[in-house]
Image (cartoon, rainbow, N blue to C red):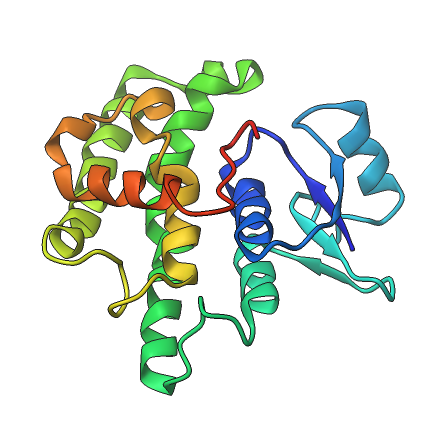
């Protein structure tokens, strides 16, 4: 397999993390934001939706979107519940991550991290993202204050999915992570897993 991956992106990192936890390998093609490599990958048709990550299967099929890739890689593994309701509950967290959480936590971090986007980081927008991002993190905290994992009693793809941007929310996004002890314990739990690799790993 070949993974077109943006090294600095939490969405691409989710896939690299799952591959590492599963002990699976893929050829990594780095396509960093605004780089010649990502322009080349787009021109050659390797990024169907115009962005990374994209997993290219051994037969040449292309699978875009981080959470779709997680579901494909996770099929039949310990990270996907066998029970239909538990699986759906896992997916509900993953849909929420893309629809709500990423739009504040990831976006605020991106506006500060990527120089070409900093002109969009107006004080009003950053304040709004901070307030709404803290509210989204509180949703996670409400669950993790009394549970080890986001969905069910074991680790699922939901945890890998939300770990991608949550674990750098303080460093990149400027969120006050001291407000979320349950999240912090969860971050430590995941980073201690056998096979774990960090964002820069």
As drawn, the residue found furthest toward the front would be 194
Q: Is residue 181 left or right of residue 24?
A: left
Q: Position of residue 146 (x, y in %)?
A: 10, 56
Q: Quadrant of the C terminus?
A: top right
Q: Is residue 67 found left or right of 135 in the rendered image?
A: right
Q: Quick check: can you spot residue 132?
A: no
Q: Which residue is found at the position 44% from the left and 23% from the top?
A: 111
Quarter of the image where one finds residue 52: top right
Q: Is residue 147 above or below residue 138?
A: below
Q: Position of residue 24 (x, y in %)?
A: 66, 55
Quadrant of residue 8 within the rendered picture: top right
Left or right of 58? Residue 149 is left
Viewer-proximal residue among 77 and 105: 77
Q: Is residue 27 above or below residue 127?
A: below
Residue sticking out furthest to the bottom = 84
Question: In the rendered image of this protein, does residue 33 appear above or below residue 44?
Answer: above
Residue 196 visible somewhere in the drawing: yes
> In percent of the image, x 33 and y 50: which residue is there?
100
Q: Nearer the viewer, residue 111 or 59?
A: 59
Report the residue at 61% width, 68% height from top: 72
Residue 141: give x, y in percent of width and height.
16, 47
Q: Position of residue 88 (x, y in %)?
A: 37, 77
Residue 63 position by quadrant: bottom right
């Amino acid at each position: 397999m070949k993974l077109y991956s943006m090294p600095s992106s939490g969405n691409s990192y989710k896939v690299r993390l799952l591959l590492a936890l599963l002990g699976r390998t893929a050829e990594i093609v780095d396509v960093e934001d605004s780089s010649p490599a990502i322009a080349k990958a787009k021109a050659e048709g390797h990024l169907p939706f115009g962005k990374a990550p994209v997993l290219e299967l051994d037969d040449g099929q292309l699978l875009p979107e981080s959470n779709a890739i997680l579901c494909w890689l996770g099929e039949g593994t310990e990270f996907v519940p066998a029970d239909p309701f538990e699986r759906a509950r896992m997916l509900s967290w993953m849909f929420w991550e893309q629809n709500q959480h990423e739009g504040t936590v990831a976006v605020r971090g991106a506006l500060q991290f990527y120089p070409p986007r900093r002109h969009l980081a107006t004080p009003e927008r950053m304040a709004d993202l901070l307030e709404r991002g803290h509210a989204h993190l509180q949703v996670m905290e409400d669950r993790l204050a009394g549970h080890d994992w986001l969905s069910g009693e074991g680790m699922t793809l939901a945890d890998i999915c939300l770990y991608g941007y949550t674990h750098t929310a303080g460093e990149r996004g400027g969120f006050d992570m001291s407000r979320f002890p349950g999240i912090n314990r969860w971050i430590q739990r995941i980073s201690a897993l056998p096979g774990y690799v960090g964002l820069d790993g």
